[in-house]
Amino acid sequence: MKISASIRSLKPSATIAAAAKAKELKNKGVKVYEFTLGEPDFTTPQHIQDAAIAAMKAGHTHYTPSGGIAELKQAICSAYERDHGLQYQPSEVLVSNGAKHSIHNLLTATCEPGDEVIIPTPYWVSYSALVELTGATPVMVDTTEESGFCMSAEQFESAITEKTRLMMLNNPCNPTGAAYPVKALEAIAQVAVERDVLVMSDEIYEKLIYEGSEFRSLPTLREGMWDRTVVVSGVSKAYAMTGWRIGWAMGPAEVIKAMDKLQSQETSNPCSISQYAAIAALNGPQECVEEMRKEFAVRREYVLERLRALPQVTFAEPGGAFYAFFNVAAHFGRPLGGGKVVDNASDFCTALLEEAHVALVTGDAFGAPGYVRLSFATDMETLKAGFDRLEAFLSA
């Protein structure tokens, strides 16, 4: 059977692939210390679960409008006014099956072969793949550990050509945890306005900001950015609702309308029950979000302490999200735990899993050779045991 060229060239998600390798070992009875998935280990708060049950009992189990129910769109608008002072209208909101779906909708609705899409690296694994599926070309802008993995306005402007259609910005960033300083964002916004570039601002981790960092939603930063920004977010990370699959895009009504038309033909509406749960998440008590953030902050401090103690490992401290991204290239070409010699981050992660039963994700998947990503969205006991094994592996 013939498979299309675009799908044949498509690589599976590296984070999902890493989790699958870990699960394969677990199925053999091996205890695996897993740090691969970007998924909170908390249970969805009870009041959100209760709202879903109530929705089912009330009969909200049928099709909804393809772009989401009016009540959820209004809840999203109200949340952004409450949190950021942004006054969106429901016509400027599209609810989708998770933030990844929103990104796919945006790229498919705005990009075509010959277009270029600017992506700062390291980047979330699906960005480049989703761009390539449209026939557009990803244009990578390399950032460094020394810059805190933040793209500068000068780098952004240098990457713009007459073919530029979009720039994709993830703040805070997966995989690095980089939280852009406000002044850096203001400078990027100025370039976007002056050069008339549409920006996708992926703000899914906005609630997970740590001491010393600050979050500002991109459209708030400069006059003219409102019309040039599509904000993408969802309930997955802040409310521990990854499996509920509710995300959204907010932006110019013309773009949102085009995305809605696409979604109506591809997937139709997001899960009706999940939409009512998302209303409860956004409109309900927010203390649960801060409680989870505080726990992540404790884990972050522990992770940073352990990273500082690792031999020949460098990193930039994450200002947000729940990832640590560190460079292990100094360990290439020499025997590690079990006597294996590795030459790249992918082989490093494979050896670490096979020998120490610790699962990380290679930085190769994020456009950053030599680095690995660790998710600290797991309990402290697992973190402690995992770092003990990682340290032993590096020190062998």
Image (spheres, rainbow, N blue to C red):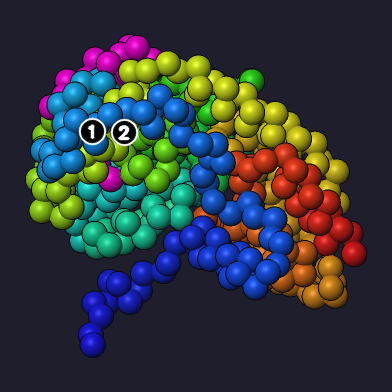
**The one of 2 and 227 positioned closer to us in this rendering:** 2
Return the x and y of residue 160 as percentages of the image width and height.
34, 44
Q: Local crowd at mark 2 within 10 Å, few (<14), some, or many (≥20)?
A: some
Q: Which element is circle 2 on?
A: helix
Instruction: Decide whether residue 339 is among the magenta residues.
Output: no
- Please state the extent of the stretch shown in magenta in the rendering: 78-97
Q: Quadrant of the C terminus?
A: bottom right
Report the quarter where the N terminus lies.
bottom left
Asked whether, in this view, residue 240 is left or right of residue 82, the answer is right
Residue 16 lies left or right of residue 282; in this view the side is right
Residue hosting label 1: 57
**Identity of the residue drawn at 60% across and 41% down:** 377
Vertical side of 104 occupied by 84: above or below: above
Q: According to the image, label 2 marks what residue?
A: 53
Figure quadrant of residue 379: top right
Report, in whole angstroms, how far the alpha carbon at label 2 lies from the one at label 1.
6 Å
| Label 1 element class | helix
> On the rendered structure, is 75 left or right of 328?
left
Measuring 83% from the left and 51% from the top, which residue is drawn there?
388
Residue 142 appears in the picture as rendered: no
Q: Are discs 2 and 1 less than 8 Å apart at CB? A: yes
Q: Residue flagged by tag 2: what amino acid is it?
A: Ile
x and y, in percent, of residue 82 in the image:
35, 12
Q: Height in image: 245 above or below 290?
A: below
For the point 44% across and 28% down, the residue is 46
In the rendered structure, which amino acid carries the disc numbered 1?
Answer: Lys
